[in-house]
Image: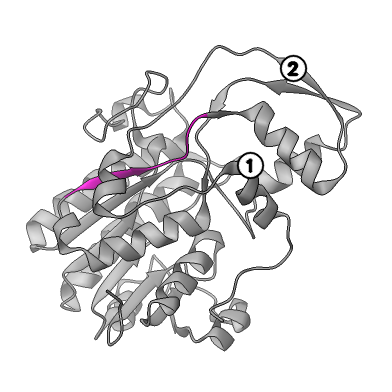
Amino acid sequence: MDLKGKTIAVTGATGFLGTYLSLALLRRGATVRGVVRSPHKGPWLAQQGVDFAKADLMEPDALKAAFSGVDAIISNAALFTMEKASWDDFYQPNRVGTDNVFRAAHQAGVSRIVQISSVAVYHKRFPKNLHESTPLLTERQRGRFWAYAVTKALSEQLAWDLATEFGQELTVLRPGPIYGQGDKNIIPMIEKLFRAPFLPSPSLGFPAVHAEDVANAACEAVLNPQSAGKAYNLAGPPEPISTLLKHWKDISGQGPLLIPTPVPFVASYDISAAQTDLRFKNRPLVDGVRETLSGTIPSTN
């Protein structure tokens, strides 16, 4: 199956994951409408075939116009940062932005939505193979959990509520830590750490997932109407952070002395539903790191 003849709107299309989402949709024949705050940031994507509509998450009327005539929306735009940010910094785009997107979609007559959430929304972290039915964070955890995680949980709950109210067909994807070309969080952090002469190399299990594998699952969600009304974990196996750092050092050809550091915790997620319904496959970590460090974003060609 492909998406020829379908127009799919992607919020945050010029961002890290948004780029991969846009390219994956184009490869499947879709017309992609990038709904972004700053279209001028996407000339390369425009050359690949993305059409842009200017709309901020805080602009309901602009969102409604941007969604007019599309067959489905991938609600991807949100704030994720490992830098210092306030509760309101996260709450406005993540929760209020979701409210605006779903209401604008309803007003534009769009009923099919795929929302990009996160495994960070779970109240529990370390029991192995967390299922999609695991309870989510609520606003009661505000101040005790990372504001990003709580606001994403609030965003997801609101999405389900609005989808029910408006009769929208919603699929929620919960990726693990995402890495790949253009990442502005994990890559800069590792590059900074690699300036040191030596570095602790913890055995903590890290369920990283490559951005292109998340994008492919999102395309499958759009293609598969049976995924509506369901949430899916998208995560890699919990390979030790030490393995990630070793691959990074080996492939880049440089880096500090890595000091093994035992940390007896593993975060892992049940991905069986995504494997069955969305044909989800997570590439081997070494291949993902190699692509990340290649310096070449895969095009539609």
Is residue 143 shown to the viewer in this render? yes
Name the side, left or right, on which 49 lies relative to 112.
right
Above or below 276: residue 241? above
Task: Give the labeled residue for mark 1.
Answer: 83
Observer-side mark, 1 or 2, equals 2
* Residue 248 place in picture, x, y as percent: 74, 41
Q: Percent position (x, y) of residue 246?
A: 74, 34
Answer above or below: position of 199 versus 40: above
- Which secondary structure, mark 1? loop
Q: Position of residue 68 (x, y in %)?
A: 26, 84
Residue 164 placement, left or right of 28? left
Classify residue 285 by image quadrant: top right
Residue occupying the point 22% across, 71% down: 105
Q: Nearer the viewer, residue 242 or 183?
A: 242
Indicate the amino acid at tag 1.
Glu
Residue 34 at x, y percent in the picture: 44, 77
Local SS, label 2: strand
Farthest right residue in view: 197
Residue type, mark 2 in image: Pro
Q: Which residue is mark 2?
A: 260
- Residue 153 lies in quadrant: top left
Quarter of the picture containing the N terminus is: bottom left
151 and 164: which is toward the camera: 164
- 125 lies above or below 24: above
Residue drawn 15% across the image and 52% down it:
229
Give the residues in magenta: 230-238
Whether residue 76 is visible here, answered yes or no, is: no
Nearest the viewer among 143 and 217 is: 217
**Mark 1 / mark 2, whichever is N-terminal:** 1
Q: Quadrant of the C terminus?
A: bottom right
- Asked whether 236 falls inside the magenta stretch, the response is yes
